[in-house]
Image (cartoon, rainbow, N blue to C red):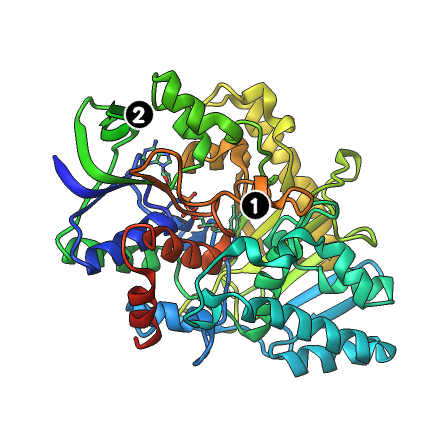
Amino acid sequence: MQFDVVIIGSGLGGLLCGNILSNEGYNVCIIEKNHKLGGSLQTFGRKGCIFNTGLNYTESLDDGQVLNQYFRYFGLLDKLPLRKLDEDGFDVINFRDGKYKLAMEHDKYRDTLLQYFPKEKNGLTKYLEQIRGICHSISLYTFSEKPFNIFENKALGIGAAEFIRSMISDPRLQNVIAGNNLLYAGHEKKTPLFVHALINNSFIESAWRIADGSHQLVKLLADKITGNGGTILRNAKAEKFIIENDRIKSVVLANGEQVEGNYFICNTHPAQLLSMTDSPKIRNRFSYRISTLEDTIGMFTTYLVFKKNTFPYFNYNFYHYNQDSVWIAGDYDLSKWPQCYGLLPTATSKSDYYAESASLITYMQYSELETWENTFTGNRGEDYIRFKNEKATLLLNALERQFPGITSCVETWYTSTPLTWRDYTGTRSGSAYGILKDYNKPLETMVLPRTKIPNLLLTGQNTNVHGILGVTIGSVVTCGEIIDIQQLMKKIRSA
Ligand SMILES: Cc1cc2nc3c(=O)[nH]c(=O)nc-3n(C[C@H](O)[C@H](O)[C@H](O)COP(=O)(O)OP(=O)(O)OC[C@H]3O[C@@H](n4cnc5c(N)ncnc54)[C@H](O)[C@@H]3O)c2cc1C
């Protein structure tokens, strides 16, 4: 099999690159190790409910906003059943002694928070101006013709927590502003302002759920690729590269088949590349820093099935902290687990009044799972099941304290750990968002799509920024190494 571009992995980044390049006439092949496409966008069904795994809500989909324009170009906008979250409070940040709404649109966001923190008008105004300014300095955010160079962005070298503290005096408000940082595994001493600003600003612009599951996004993207003449191979694990003259000639699949290409785009965690070649020359080029980079923490999720018509659907996400600081990812304390959680109800077209299901998410360190490190999903033994049940019970007990009676509405639940993520998506240590960006080391921790192998590129959450918007922008940057990015941007702008 011979293709112009071979893409390893059908996560969002792989599917978007496949769309862009097949739209441009390239003969594209996507190789996916699982039967199901989509990586973190996979859904699963239980008891008649659909569960999203890695897309609970997304951002900036109103007319004129950044993801709206990208989704138009990808032909997704009018085909996805999008549900806008509550404009008066799309996220609710809850502490033991207070609950705060994050509203949509910058003025409303500020004015809503001013009701709780009336003295912070100047700080909030300045904070919002700054995060908007950071986003607007990114050419792929505003669709300007300025070349994209992420390293020119000073916000990569500034700490998000420190920046918020410099703008806002009230410690509680500082934490409220970062209160949805489960979205980026906020690390007080590492998360760059760039990551916080891109995510926070875009969700303040507008926040949305996809009703009935994120697999619809995957199907639309995959259908477009095959419609453009592309090929998608499922159950096809890429295991080894065949190198010729310092370039990749082909990739060998687990079943022994070889897929040849002119270009190879890797949508997996880049650490996988280290095991894909024996050539020391090439290995040294891959491994120069990837093996030393840290990943973000992983997640433990309890997927709740509610008894029919018992628990009201709420059109927002609820984040709870059992301590004052929301910067938990870098200060994980097992003795206080769960220090925080997010309750994210699933939107369905069946009812807007009652929730059918929800995801209950918190952090989990990989070290807690070392006993089962050498097992594979579905075969980890009774002690693993017991471990998960104990963790889910702790999480449900914490939830019950904020929503008295909720556990009596739960018919049953299912769980996933970072090991589940490791086995399904191939991400190192089951990390939620891939390589951890660190403002102390912005150049080392921001991985670019270009590698030292001339025909090998990277895409997905490990390059640029994670999340739907981050990966979308990243896929454009990756494709810009093969096609003219200015021409591509013109098409996206005019979509
Ligand atoms: C719990 C959780 C909740 C999240 N919630 C949100 C949210 O609400 N909003 C949001 O914007 N983002 C969210 N995210 C983040 C978002 O889902 C990810 O950033 C994004 O989907 C990652 O896409 P990716 O392209 O990097 O690929 P991935 O999803 O990592 O997919 C990689 C693909 O490569 C395949 N693969 C790996 N190795 C091989 C191989 N050797 N051969 C062939 N195929 C291979 C995998 O099977 C997989 O399909 C969440 C993430 C997590 C973990």
Front residue (pair 230, 392)? 230
Picture quadrant where residue 118 is located: bottom right
Instruction: Using the numbered discs, state the Cα–Cα distance from disc 2 to disc 1 in whole angstroms.
Output: 32 Å
The residue labelled by disc 2 is: 239
Residue drawn at x 32%, y 59% is 216
On screen, 482 above or below 104?
Answer: above
Q: Quadrant of the N terminus?
A: top left
Q: Quadrant of the C terminus?
A: bottom left
Label 1, secondary structure: give it: strand
The count of marks equals 2
Q: Callout 2: few (<14), some (14-19), or many (20+) C-alpha neighbours within 10 Å? A: some
Q: Callout 1: few (<14), some (14-19), or many (20+) C-alpha neighbours within 10 Å? A: many
Front residue (pair 402, 25)? 25
Say whether residue 21 is visible.
yes
The residue labelled by disc 1 is: 302
On screen, 70 above or below 88?
Answer: above
| Residue 192 locus on image (x, y percent) | 65, 52
Front residue (pair 466, 414)? 466
On screen, 486 above or below 325?
Answer: below
**134 left or right of 261?**
right
Residue drawn at x 41%, y 29% is 272
Say whether residue 306 is visible.
no
Residue drawn at x 34%, y 33% is 453
Q: What amino acid is found at the position of numbered circle 1 in the picture?
A: Thr
